[in-house]
Image: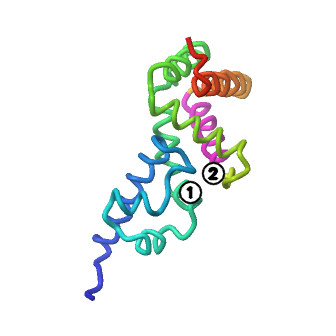
Amino acid sequence: MPKRSKAQTQQTIELILAEAKHQLLMLGYEGMSYTTLSEATGVSRTGISHHFPRKQDFMVALEPFIVDSLRMPLDTTSTINAFMTSWMQAMHANGDFKATLKLCFYLLISGKADNGAAFRILKALQKECEQRMQTDLTVAFSQLLGASLLLCRQKSEGHAK
């Protein structure tokens, strides 16, 4: 079997990561598996596990992209109130934003998976927003995470308005 070039290997890794991100948001952490990734990408389970030996490795590799996707809908150019409003608007109108937070909450709370990635993602998001806004967002972040957790729970129980 001929050896793959670095470019081909990188392309395969990017394909796997794109599908992993999609499945993590659509199926959740437990729903994504080496089998579902293999079926969606055409890369063998062995090939996937060569690049990502543990399921947690997907989260580690995706951390910067997840932080960026969470930050993008947020208003970090104005006031704390505008920031908080943009967060809540994203929770209600941006499916990927809400799904990403649900994934982080799952990893933090479930105990079934490595919660370090979720903690790092949320801390990096807070730090990046604070740097852009040049202000401390500790209180605002705590309030927003609490409200978001409640909204995610309501929606999953079918009690959303």
Q: Residue at x 59, y 28 (%)?
A: 156
> In the image shown, does 125 or 29 lie closer to the viewer?
29
Q: Which residues are magenta?
A: 118-132
Q: Which residue is mark 1?
A: 60
Q: Which residue is mark 2?
A: 117
- Answer few, some or many: residues within 10 Å of disc 1's Cα (few below 14, many 20 plus, some between 14 and 19): some
Report the amino acid beneath label 2: Ala
From the viewer's perspective, is residue 16 above or below residue 63? below
Residue at the limit of the structure toward the left, as seen here: 2
Question: Helix, strand, or loop for circle 2?
Answer: helix
Q: Residue at x 55, y 14 (%)?
A: 85
Q: How is the image coloured?
A: rainbow
- Residue 65 location (% of width, % of height): 46, 46
Q: Residue at x 35, y 60 (%)?
A: 39
Pointers 1 and 2 in contact (CB under 8 A)?
yes
Mark 2 or mark 1, which is nearer the start of the sequence? 1
- Answer few, some or many: residues within 10 Å of disc 2's Cα (few below 14, many 20 plus, some between 14 and 19): many
Report the amino acid beneath label 1: Val
> In the image shown, does 157 or 131 lie closer to the viewer?
157
Please identify the dominant SS of the magenta region: helix
